[in-house]
Image (cartoon, grey):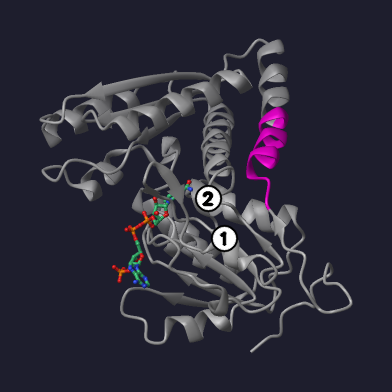
Amino acid sequence: MSSTRPPADSDASGTIDTVTVDGLGLANTLRDEMKAEIEALVAAGHRAPHLTVVLVGDDPASKSYIKGKQRACARIGADSSEHILPSATSEEDLLSLLDKLNNDDRVDGILVQLPLPKHISAEAVAEAIDPAKDADALHPLNFGRLLLGNAKLISCTPLGVMAVLKHHGIEISGRHAVVIGRSNIVGKPVSILLQQQNATVTMCHSRTQDLPGVCRGADILVAAVGSPQMVKADWIKPGAAVMDVGVTEVDGKLVGDVDFAAAQGVASIITPSRRGIGPMTITMLLRNTLNAYVARKELGSA
Ligand code: NAP
């Protein structure tokens, strides 16, 4: 097992000065870069990229996520639109809308907000989105390409995690990364990305035995479960980089999977549950939309 890099910011007594990731600050820097790219495209006479978000049902949290995505698009000069369908919408009607969006040359990125009502198959929806416009990269073609190491579009939250690690200069190659959670949207893709950057990756899930012990071996710990404060301080190897993806609303507050307060002085770096991975996820959605637009333009289809 690899050893964790000695924490750069530990004092003489060995106490670690934990860095809290400013996910919003990094997201804003990356959004400014995209804004400049889009301004250059528009100045050259091209249209702006366009993200469309589809929501089935009237879940208030999902509606607020959609508003956040629209504001983020506006901030970088991208176009956005929304399709809010009643919760009783049939799978057939949803697939027919996706077919129209696939064939609309002015739409570059399509995101179907999850979760979907139970009567609609998430697999059928993922397969119905044109892989070239698949803003959260859930189509099997994009997933397969990710596995093969030649992905064009990659799921947004894993991309956000990798961007945070890169920005903070966290060494990945040869390190032991532990990922808790194996969902298609977070756990699996982030495990693949870490492994492609030469980490030795352990994927954990609800049947993992001695989860605290496995986590204690992690130089990089990614928690993507949705279980508030499940990861305790003594699960964290001193000096580890902790990426807390989990977000659960508890008494009106967003709480991560990691006991953030207790991790202070143990982790070398940690993402907070607010202004951590969340803004980076939206930023990567914008990046995927812009990349999809540029790729389609190069193919002459945008
Ligand atoms: P998910 O599909 O529900 O998957 C949860 C995973 O956690 C599953 O693989 C499950 O294992 C595992 N798990 C459940 N209980 C466990 C336990 N006690 N010990 C170990 N593993 C356990 O969730 P998701 O969509 O990946 O999302 C995970 C969390 O990230 C949620 O809080 C979500 O809100 C958050 N999230 C945040 C962002 C963001 O932008 N910040 C984006 C996406 C998701 P099994 O496979 O064995 O069931």
Residue 280 painted magenta: no
Residue in the image at 33% along x and 34% along y: 62
Find residue 144 and report its image quarter. Answer: bottom left
What secondary structure is found at the residue carrying circle 2? loop
Q: Which mark is residue 273?
A: 2
Residue in the image at 68% along x and 33% along y: 28
Mark 1 vs ligand 1: CB below 8 Å: no
Relative depth, front residue between 235 and 81: 235
The amino acid type of the residue labelled 2 equals: Ser
Q: Is residue 283 above or below residue 74?
A: below
Q: Which mark is residue 146?
A: none
Circle 1: is it few (<14), some (14-19), or many (20+) Cα within 10 Å?
Answer: many
Q: Is residue 4 visible?
A: yes
Mark 2 vs ligand 1: CB below 8 Å: no
Measured as percent of width and height from the top left, residue 134 is found at: 41, 39
Magenta span of residues: 21-33
Q: Is residue 154 visible?
A: no
Q: Are marks 2 and 1 in contact (CB under 8 Å)?
A: yes
Q: Is residue 276 above or below residue 145?
A: above
| Number of marks in picture | 2
Residue that label 1 marks: 260
Measured as percent of width and height from the top left, residue 294 is found at: 59, 30
Going from the N terminus, do you reach mark 2 or mark 1 first? 1
Magenta span: predominant SS is helix
